[in-house]
Amino acid sequence: MFWRFAALVVLALVGAVPGGARALEVVTVTPPSGVHLKPGGEARVAIQIVVKPGYHVQANPVENPSLIPITLKVESDANISIGEPRYPAAKRIRLPGDSQDLVVYDGSFVIALPVQVSHSATAGETITLRGALRYQACDDSHCLFPVTLPVSLSVAVKGR
Amino acid sequence: MLRGIVLVIAGVVSLLAQPVYAGWNYRIGEAAPEFQLKALDGNVYGSAELKGKWVVVSFMTTWCPFCNAAAPHFERLNQEYGKRGVKAFIVDVSEKPEVVSGWIAKHKLTCPVLLDSTGTVTTSYAPPPDFVPDLKREEVMIASFMIIDPDGTIRFLALNEDVASFDARLVKLRAALDELLPKQ
């Protein structure tokens, strides 16, 4: 009797499906842990993006304006100026029957973010900037709703 | 005790042996769920008024590459099969009307586009959670195509299994319509 019950429990657990599936997380975004710049200094900061195997995200820019390009936005601060992100070259794929290529990213790639510290920044302070990464992912057969992930970038101001 | 262990193993093995996708017959033969949705043309469309008609429904979003690839072919199908009395609809899943209206203009869509702003109707048409369990039910339905017969029974549902099975030109949908519709 016990084993029959255990069998049912195992079957229920193995076959269990969440009633309302949560948004599937297929992208991770990792800003560098330590950005150190002097007042007046500038750098291109590499924001590492990793897409789960089997998935791709729409590149930036997209060729079909209806699609949602991956977009990184980080807010500037009084002492830190953020430039336009530079996105890598995209991979081209074509769906069967489509007349237009799709431009996508998969695997691991970097978005380069220009960062400039003002001359009036105070050495020794660390400034944390907030931003967001918006993307829309698909695998070979399904597309997921667009997702916006929070991004946080800390810049430490060094002495001259 | 041995019998119990065998039962557990057999159960697990039988579950693991199931294909990831159980096939193309999800929802086939079931009554289409009732709905009432406002379309971008300002009209409200409901399942009650569609009884007695052959209906083709596609669940789409403006940002979905599969939908963008299939949209011109869906409009062509609407034009051709509309002459045979088929009513074609697109159900837009969880988007703002202003976004959808631009997309309709771009693809020159003439069929009604119903706005399922909460995704509830789309979910009610979705296959059970054993089909691609990681995804939300609305996500599973995006870029799917369905035929509902005059009695309100679902007769065809095309869901993608992989990119090779994606049917932008709607060949399978057309074949199913040709088979199901009364011969002229």
Image (cartoon, coloured by chain):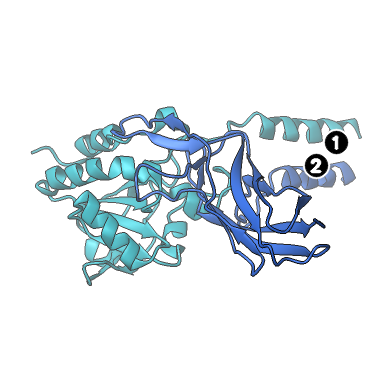
Q: How many marks?
A: 2
User: Is residue B8 at all visible to an observer of this figure?
Assistant: yes
Q: Is residue A44 left or right of residue A99?
A: right
Give whichever of A93, B85 is nearer the camera. A93
| Residue drawn at point x = 27 percent, y = 45 percent | B71
**Quarter of the figure with the C terminus of chain A:** bottom right
Task: Check whether the beta carbons of the residues at disc 2 and disc 1 lie within 8 A of each other.
Answer: yes
| Residue drawn at point x = 74 percent, y = 34 percent | B12
Q: Position of residue A159 (x, y in %)?
A: 82, 57
Q: What chain is tagged by disc 2?
A: A
Q: Is residue A59 left or right of residue A45?
A: left
| Residue drawn at point x = 20 percent, y = 53 percent | B109
Give whichever of B126, B6 is nearer the camera. B126
How busy is the neighbourhood of tag 1: few (under 14 within 10 Å), some, or many (20 plus)? some
Which residue was labeled with disc 1?
B4
Q: State the CA–CA distance, disc 2 to disc 1.
A: 7 Å
State the SS at label 2. helix
Colour of the chain lettered A: blue
> Please, which residue is most extreme toward the right here?
B1
Residue A7's disc is 2
Q: What chain is tagged by disc 1?
A: B
Colour of the chain lettered B: cyan
Q: Amino acid at mark 2?
A: Ala
